[in-house]
Image (spheres, rainbow, N blue to C red):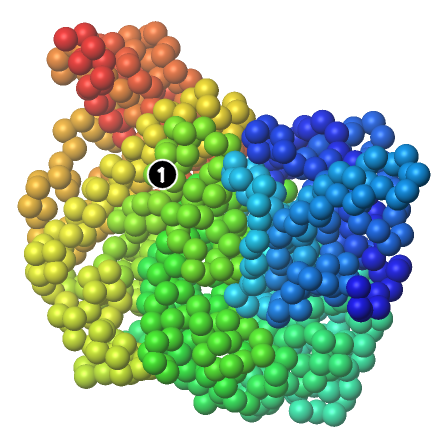
Amino acid sequence: MTRHFDRTAVAFCCLLLGPLVHAQAGADEAWLRYQSLPTQAVAGLPHLIATVGRGEVLRTAANELARALGQPATSGGARATLPDALPDQDAFVLGTLKDFEPLFPKLGTRRSMVGDGFWLKTVNRAGRRPLAGSIDSALRRPRKYWLVIGGDERGVLYGTFALLARIAQGEDVSTLDDRETPSAPIRWVNQWDNLDGSIERGYAGRSIFFDNGSVESDLTRAKEYARLLASIGINGCAINNVNADPRLLGPDFLPQLARVAEAFRPWGVRLAISVDLSSPMSAGGLKTFDPLDPQVKAWWQNTVDRIYQQIPDFAGFVIKADSEGRSGPSKYGRTAADAANVIARALAPHHGVMLYRAFVYNHHLDWRDPKADRAKAAFDYFHPLDGKFLDNVVVQIKHGPIDFQVREPVSPLLGAMAHTNQAIELQVTQEYTGQQRHLVYLVPMWKEVLDFDLHVDGITPVKRVVSGQVGKRPLGGYVAVVNVGLDRYWLGHPLAMANLYGYGRLAWNPDLSGEQIAQEWTRLTFGNDRKVLATIPRMLLPSWRMYENYTGPLGLQTLTDITGPHYGPGIESSENNGWGQWHRADPKGVGMDRTVATGTGFIGQYSPQVQKKYESVDACPDDLLLFMHHVPYTFVLDSGKTVIQHLYDAHYAGAEQAATLVEEWKSLDGLIDRARYAEVLRRQEYQAGHAIVWRDAVVNWFHQESGIPDAQGRVGFHPHRVEAEDMQLSGYTPVEVTPWETASGGKAIACTGQSLCSATFKFDRPSGTYDIAVQYFDLNHGESRFDLFVDDRRIDSWAADDHLPSDKMNGHTSTRRTVSGVRLRAGDVLKITGHPDGGEPAPLDYLEIVPDVAASHFSN
Ligand code: GCW
């Protein structure tokens, strides 16, 4: 050994392994369920874990390995400290490159290894001859080491998780020689948590960080979250809403933030916070927050220094300014670069970074102005600032020019900041994509974005721009808005976790495919059963296109209620207001003209090659046609269909597909644990019903607007439907629903001023077996109850106890209950009774009575 090495640095800490441990109670372990590690994969692995070095993250890595492979439950793991020799038995050996080199001088470890990267390597050591007279025969044994070498300590942890993921997937790890380097240094998540414990655009319960104005006293979930994040390579987390509360920078809050940083630290996740630019005034009591004012500069400097005194590894700030009513530098005639740089200068000596969001736009646009276009805003504002930001500033850019719609083109700003660090902002929380009540696997969408060639300098896919490769930038990467909550399954829908997993995997390696990620995630989350492995990816992979089909195809964007909760249909809500999410549908045609020739000129923000793709209506891909062009409904698409027929067909196809997800999932009954099986089934059944609400709303609206019938005669034709308002009503009264397209026939019935109402009708169709769907509204207050009777025989009873995001009858609250396999005879009387509760008037829309094909087939 020629190199000197420090004995303390290479001290070994060993953990002996015992039988497998079992899952803990509490939050779901998502993809880290080690109890299902395949026994044959674990069989040949060593029983000893040794670490080289002593860091906290390194210790976490060793403990994680022990936890996964089975640490003796009683002893808590035998530990021994070996000063400077390698273990005399097969072992995992974990450490950083720096500490490894002296021990393995022949490995060639000095080949470059980037921080956070890792190398998994097996090495064999020949047995040593015993010293003369020695009785220690163990020394003769050849040994094998599984080395987990990190570019830094986090790299060791990531390598450990990677090794475990391979074991869990049944891969042969007996011989390894694999290096991995993350694609980019910034791999962060943002949470939009408020200090009161609510979460903006969070759909999975309350905050794991805050409650009632303070940091939670129990940070168990925060620690578990950090573990999940670390397992997919995430190294930073901003924990509070970008609509930031200035109280966070107050002196009494800092020790509380330090506790969160402490909870994250063992997992290599650095704490960041979102801050409001006006903080020097609101939190600091100054008379101005002008970034160029010397007092303001000094205030930021002091504030940052104070933070680092208590949180030495603090990651930095996220800033939303001059956006949606937030204050910003424009108030003083300053630019984003002026503002960002002042704060960045204060962060720089501590190695902190500043993520400045490019989501800056005017939400009071004039909708009558055909040149006005929100999509142009980020480019118009930031492109002139390219090259003006300091090296520790990263501009955080949403992947599309509007706002996380079901489909958007890539933001042109990503191709226009070659001299600026950039991070792409993605959204795991499904704000515009079904809020985790709908299964939408977003990885294929992100892949399309990341692989999109911006042609700024030869071949420049987005993934090479954000990694910093294209502009040779020191920083760059990925941010996702995640918004996990206290829900047992973190994001509500257990299958939505594929998006969080997929986000981390893509930030690490954007060359992975959506299929690979779906397979990997399914194996880790549900085990290696062949049927499960075939079925779940088959549900995940087409789900984005499916959702697009029944919400807003052809680049229309999600046709949701944009001034409300962004959930159910609300087609006109985007028009005639200043928010700029216009689709410009009128009786003759639909779409936003964003061409250079006749439209807003948005397309001119791309490189000439990309412009060519979008500017002409013929070259423009169908998927984005209506984002880029205004065309008549009769315009013929590449597929040969007219725009209007495509809108109809896509909605029917999407809703049908949503129904098949229920059957797919049911085919896994018995192969998935009961709790997760039931939770997913409940959500898939709901989605199948809500997809019909979406379908009907959109097709009816466009049918009315265009006056063009559906070539297949489906729109407005519901042979199995009985409108509630057409039934014989006792106590119930008909009401108009707003917007009209969210209720069948525009009307529903409500039970007001009574404690019990009923709706009755005589079944006059052939006797047989039927499925009865009751479409009703479940408002976010009250728990109305319903009973369904056939000839006074009660066949079902349920409560409207879901928590849907509105207190009105509309597309957010419309939902259904289905009773399958009901024998009905011609002349039977069907009755629904409704018991209102808490101001919720047991509202009903319609009944759909469909012959039960399976049952008739069986009886034939
Ligand atoms: O998507 C919109 C959301 C806002 C959000 C904003 C943003 C935090 O509707 O809730 O505010 O974007 O990204 O800043």
Q: Residues within 10 Å of mark 1 (few under 14, many from 20)?
A: many
- Distance from mark 1 CB to nearest ligand 1 atom below 8 Å: no
Q: Position of residue 472 (x, y in %)?
A: 51, 81
Residue 368 visible here: yes
Q: Is residue 468 left or right of residue 370?
A: right
Q: Nearer the viewer, residue 303 or 409?
A: 409
Q: Nearer the viewer, residue 793 or 555?
A: 555
The image quadrant where one finds the C terminus is top left
Q: Is residue 399 above or below residue 669?
A: below
**Residue found 41% across the figure and 82% down from its top:** 416
**Residue found 56% across the figure and 59% down from its top:** 180
**Residue found 58% across the figure and 75% down from its top:** 475
Q: Is residue 181 left or right of residue 95?
A: left
Q: Is residue 192 left or right of residue 796?
A: right
**Farthest residue, direction front:** 132
Residue 323 visible here: no
The image quadrant where one finds the N terminus is bottom right
**Farthest residue, direction right:** 133
Q: Position of residue 331 (x, y in %)?
A: 57, 86
At label 1, the amino acid type is Met
Q: Position of residue 434 (x, y in %)?
A: 41, 47
Disc 1: which residue: 539
Q: Is residue 369 above or below residue 559?
A: below
Q: Nearer the viewer, residue 635 or 65?
A: 65
Q: Position of residue 120 (x, y in %)?
A: 61, 53
Quarter occupied by residue 18:
top right
**Residue found 72% across the figure and 52% down from its top:** 94
Quarter occupied by residue 715:
top left
Q: Is residue 379 left or right of residue 65?
A: left
